Image (cartoon, rainbow, N blue to C red):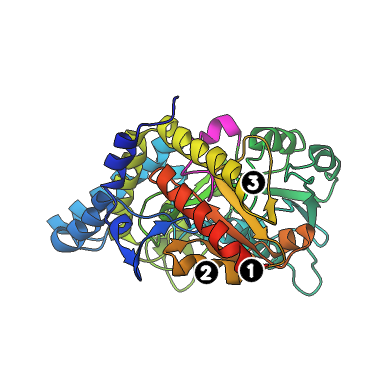
């Protein structure tokens, strides 16, 4: 697809009220989309509607409001299913986010793993796909992480990956897209290799879902996790896709209302999928609004989203390389997503972020919840600018101009 016209991008921007606000004396330039995206008005209005018109607890009432709210929640589940091409709504579990989704899988699937069980992860994982596996270790049972390294561009070493499997391998847990490097990992190949060894695979889709169409069946993922707030949706909602046979074998994650069949003081039976994994009152007002975020992406279209983000990535990277003195880029994998991590000379990432903020530019600085990757890169942290479909070339120019302006102060 050709680069979308300014008119098209402006009509998309108009749907995001927050993009019009000012930060100090400057208009906001929001380049922190990897951490969370801004939210279109239709999503916020859906939350309002749920609070004003249909707020009643789901799945528990015979009364009209409860039934309406339940319908909205279950419509969102069906939308999420279709969005990632999962075979059944029973395989779509609502969580608080990617983090909770991964914790759920780790603690349930790993509950009875033996001492010495191994989980293969990549060097570029977010902490939320590292720590939940480490938490499975306890006195007398050590769970080991085996790590797939990356090359100098941020591309996974697939030969090493293939050689990490052994009789102790219990799980593969890999990110689809790196939140620091922007690398898009070959998740289909990763899943196929895991399947060949009879090992389940979890894909962390937190950074993939807002940029590309995800088909969990085509990928061959046993589990796929993502967060609504990173895909133009509400906070407090995540989705875990899990293969039905694996979910059925797994014990529940938490106990409470909704997840039970029958309870006595002697014994409890559990609800059918997906409710077995949804203890307690879900974030039903936000879940109802998730439908609007999915509609926004479907109506905008991944072709257009990709075309705009790819244009901004290439243009901004080119301009930065040409104009910003002392620039160090981290993550140059072919086909990477629109995430630019960098440092300027010896400047501290935090100082760069602060000076950009003074000019109205929101970027993220620090280790980005990927400290092992920072160790591999030999840095303490980086500055990260990340684009969404609503960002413009004018914003990219303003950002690069700002870097040129502050660079001399930072050397
Ligand atoms: N995985 C990746 C790759 C991420 O980038 C993030 C958040 O930045 C997460 C997991 C955690 O997502 P959440 O905080 O929404 O649970």
Is the CB atom of the residue marked by disc 3 within 8 angstroms of ligand 1's nearest atom? no
Tell me the CA gap for discs 3 and 2. Answer: 20 Å
Residue 76 is situated, as x and y percent measured from the top left of the image, at 32, 46
- Residue at 86%, 41% in the rendered image: 163
Look at the numbered discs 2 and 1 and tell me whether their residues touch, using CB distance below 8 Å: yes
Badge 1: how crowded within 10 Å, few (<14), some, or many (20+)?
some
Q: Is residue 151 above or below residue 144?
A: above
The reply, left or right, for residue 175 in relation to residue 63 is: right
Per the rendering, the mark at residue 410 is 1
The reply, left or right, for residue 359 in relation to residue 341 is: left
Tell me the CA gap for discs 1 and 3. Answer: 17 Å
Badge 2: how crowded within 10 Å, few (<14), some, or many (20+)?
some
Residue annotated with mark 2: 355
User: Which secondary structure, mark 1?
Assistant: helix
Which is more N-terminal, label 1 or label 2? 2
Image quarter of the N terminus: top left
Q: Is residue 243 above or below residue 279?
A: above
Residue annotated with mark 3: 321
Q: Nearer the viewer, residue 218 or 11?
A: 11
Which is more N-terminal, label 3 or label 1? 3
Quarter, ligand 1: bottom right
Per the rendering, the mark at residue 1 is none
- Residue at 41%, 42% in the rendered image: 389
- Residue at 66%, 48% in the rendered image: 174
Is the CB atom of the residue marked by disc 2 within 8 angstroms of ligand 1's nearest atom? no
Residue 222 is situated, as x and y percent measured from the top left of the image, at 60, 41
Q: Nearer the viewer, residue 82 or 371?
A: 371
Q: Which residues are magenta?
A: 205-220
User: Which secondary structure, mark 2?
Assistant: helix
Tell me the CA gap for discs 2 and 1. Answer: 9 Å
Which is more N-terminal, label 2 or label 3? 3
Residue 291 is situated, as x and y percent measured from the top left of the image, at 31, 46
């Amino acid at each position: 697809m050709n680069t979308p016209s300014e008119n098209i991008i402006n009509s998309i921007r108009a749907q995001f009220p927050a993009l019009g606000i000012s930060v100090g004396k400057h208009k906001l330039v929001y380049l922190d989309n990897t951490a969370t995206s801004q939210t279109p008005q239709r999503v916020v209005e859906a939350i309002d509607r749920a609070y004003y018109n249909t707020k009643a607890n789901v799945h528990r009432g015979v009364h009209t409001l409860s039934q309406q709210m339940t319908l909205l929640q279950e419509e969102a589940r069906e939308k999420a299913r279709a969005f990632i091409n999962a075979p059944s709504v029973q395989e779509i579990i609502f969580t608080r986010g990617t983090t909770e989704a991964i914790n759920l899988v780790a603690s349930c699937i790993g509950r009875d793993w033996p001492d010495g069980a191994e989980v293969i992860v990549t060097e570029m994982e977010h902490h939320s796909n590292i720590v939940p596996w480490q938490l499975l270790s306890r006195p007398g049972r050590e769970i080991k992480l085996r790590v797939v390294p990356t090359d100098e561009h941020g591309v996974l070493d697939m030969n090493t990956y293939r050689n990490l499997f052994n009789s102790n391998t219990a799980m593969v847990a890999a990110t689809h897209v790196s939140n620091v490097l922007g690398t898009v990992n070959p998740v289909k190949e990763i899943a196929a290799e895991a399947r060949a060894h009879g090992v389940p695979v979890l894909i962390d889709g937190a950074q993939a879902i807002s940029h590309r169409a995800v088909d969990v069946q085509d990928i061959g993922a046993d589990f796929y996790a993502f967060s609504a707030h990173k895909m133009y949706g509400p906070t407090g909602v995540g989705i875990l896709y899990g293969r039905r046979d694996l979910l059925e074998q797994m014990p529940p994650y938490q106990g409470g209302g909704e997840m039970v069949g029958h309870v006595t003081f002697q014994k409890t039976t559990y609800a059918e999928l997906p409710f077995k994994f949804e203890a307690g009152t879900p974030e039903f007002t936000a879940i109802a609004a998730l439908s609007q975020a999915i509609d926004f992406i479907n109506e905008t279209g991944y072709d257009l989203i990709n075309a705009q983000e790819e244009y901004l990535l290439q243009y901004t990277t080119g301009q930065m390389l040409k104009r910003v003195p002392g620039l160090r880029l981290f993550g140059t994998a072919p086909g990477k997503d629109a995430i630019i991590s960098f440092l300027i000379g010896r400047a501290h990432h935090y100082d760069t972020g602060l000076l950009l903020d003074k000019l109205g530019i929101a970027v993220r600085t620090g280790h980005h919840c990927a400290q092992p990757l920072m160790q591999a890169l030999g840095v303490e942290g980086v500055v990260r600018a990340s684009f969404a479909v609503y960002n413009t070339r004018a914003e990219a120019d303003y950002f690069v101009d700002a870097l040129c302006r502050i660079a001399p102060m930072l050397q």
